[in-house]
């Protein structure tokens, strides 16, 4: 069995190392992407919420298979795209803080584009 890779960085450090997407300035008075049901990424693609919050098994599958992954810090105020080579590290750092029991820090949602692509959106909330 392969040995689990552990990260020396905290999730906050990993996210801080990623560039925020365009248009990710705090959106005062607006709903988060999860609440609003839609998100526009830095390329201008409109994504609509398909389902969620998701359970950990589905999130784990989407970490590997989704076309895109975005973390919405501060309830979606700052959107940070996660590159394909950073998804496993992000998963390792968030999996134990999912809102499965109602006390977690993150919730994940499945968003879809008009052309059928899949976005895994992970929202941080207080």
Image: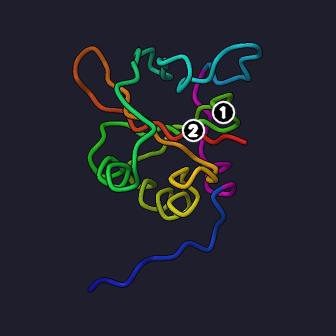
The N terminus, quarter of image: bottom left
Q: Is residue 4 above or below residue 112?
A: below
Q: CB of mark 2 within 8 Å of CB of mark 1?
A: yes
Q: Earlier in the sequence, mark 2 or mark 1?
A: 1
Mark 2 to mark 1: distance in Å? 6 Å
Left-right relation of 17 to 5? right
Label number found at residue 101? none
Q: Quadrant of residue 31?
A: top right
Q: Nearer the viewer, residue 46 or 30?
A: 30
Q: Is residue 75 above or below residue 2?
A: above
Region in magenta: 12-22
Q: Is residue 39 above or below residue 59?
A: above
Residue drawn 61% across the image and 53% down it:
104
Residue position marked by numbered label 1 in the rendering: 75
The spot of residue 117 in percent (x, y) is 26, 27
The spot of residue 6 in percent (x, y) is 51, 76
The spot of residue 98 in percent (x, y) is 54, 53
Label number found at residue 123? 2
Residue drawn 40% across the image and 38% down it:
120
Badge 2 marks a residue whose secondary structure is strand
Residue 86: say if magenta: no
Q: Quadrant of residue 4?
A: bottom left
Residue 14: say if magenta: yes
Residue drawn 68% across the image and 28% down it:
77
Left-right relation of 56 to 80? left
Badge 1 marks a residue whose secondary structure is helix
The spot of residue 95 in percent (x, y) is 50, 60
């Amino acid at each position: 069995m392969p040995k689990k890779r552990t990260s020396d960085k905290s999730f906050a450090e990993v996210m801080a190392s990623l560039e925020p997407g365009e248009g990710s300035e705090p959106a005062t008075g607006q709903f988060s992407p999860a609440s609003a049901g839609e998100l526009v990424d830095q390329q201008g693609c409109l994504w609509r919420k398909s389902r969620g919050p998701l359970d950990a098994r589905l999130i784990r599958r989407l970490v590997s298979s989704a076309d895109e992954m975005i973390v919405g810090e501060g309830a979606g105020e700052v959107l940070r795209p996660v590159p394909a080579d950073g998804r496993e590290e992000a998963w390792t750092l968030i999996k134990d803080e999912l809102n499965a029991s109602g006390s977690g820090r993150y919730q994940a949602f499945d968003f879809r584009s008009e052309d059928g692509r899949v976005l895994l959106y992970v929202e941080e909330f207080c």
